[in-house]
Amino acid sequence: MTTPANYRQGSTWLQTSPVDFSHDLAGADRADERISEVEELKIPFPGVWEISYHARSYTGGTAAASELVRTALFKNGQLIPGTEALTGGHTVMQTTAGQTILEKFDLNDVITLHAYRIGSNLASVISNGDGRTGVMAHWVSPGF
């Protein structure tokens, strides 16, 4: 997916557009899935960027078995360490979590949101007017 022309962009910041969706995490335990409903962000110039995200998750755990959702950002298809966030528990729950870190990027690097489930119950990443899922990037400096 390419970044649409109408996504929010300034001279030093990028942000995904609000979107309504429900993405069921149907893969195997701990198998990352790209949350394709959230636009990718393409870095327009190199340097250090502050990147952050918030992801609203739904878990359908029970008292007998918990369900967790791990979300994270990826750069060019590889996990960005430090962006992982974990939500869920022993009950049906909706939670929004995320992370903010500094990361060095090259021109045209691509940031995407991924998630996986831990457990065998229903788990999803969702977004609507009651809780948005999104990714933001703000240019900080030309590099460390």
Image: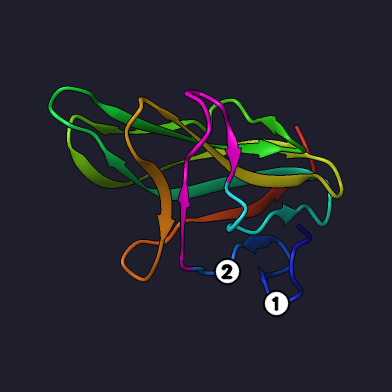
| Segment tinted magenta in the rendering | 20-34
**Is residue 66 left or right of 46 when viewed as pictured?**
left
Residue 67, x across and y down, in percent: 30, 30
**Is residue 9 left or right of 42 when viewed as pictured?**
left
Picture layout, residue 134 above or below residue 95: below
**Disc ID at residue 6:** 1
Q: Is residue 21 magenta?
A: yes
Residue 58, x across and y down, in percent: 32, 46
Residue 114, x across and y down, in percent: 57, 40
**Amino acid carrying mark 2 in the image:** Ser
Magenta stretch, main secondary structure class: loop
Quadrant in the picture for the N terminus: bottom right
* Number of marks in picture: 2
Q: Quadrant of residue 72?
A: top right
Q: According to the image, what is the colour scheme of the structure? A: rainbow
**Disc ID at residue 89:** none
Residue 83, x across and y down, in percent: 53, 33
- Asked if marks 1 and 2 touch (Cβ < 8 Å), the reply is yes
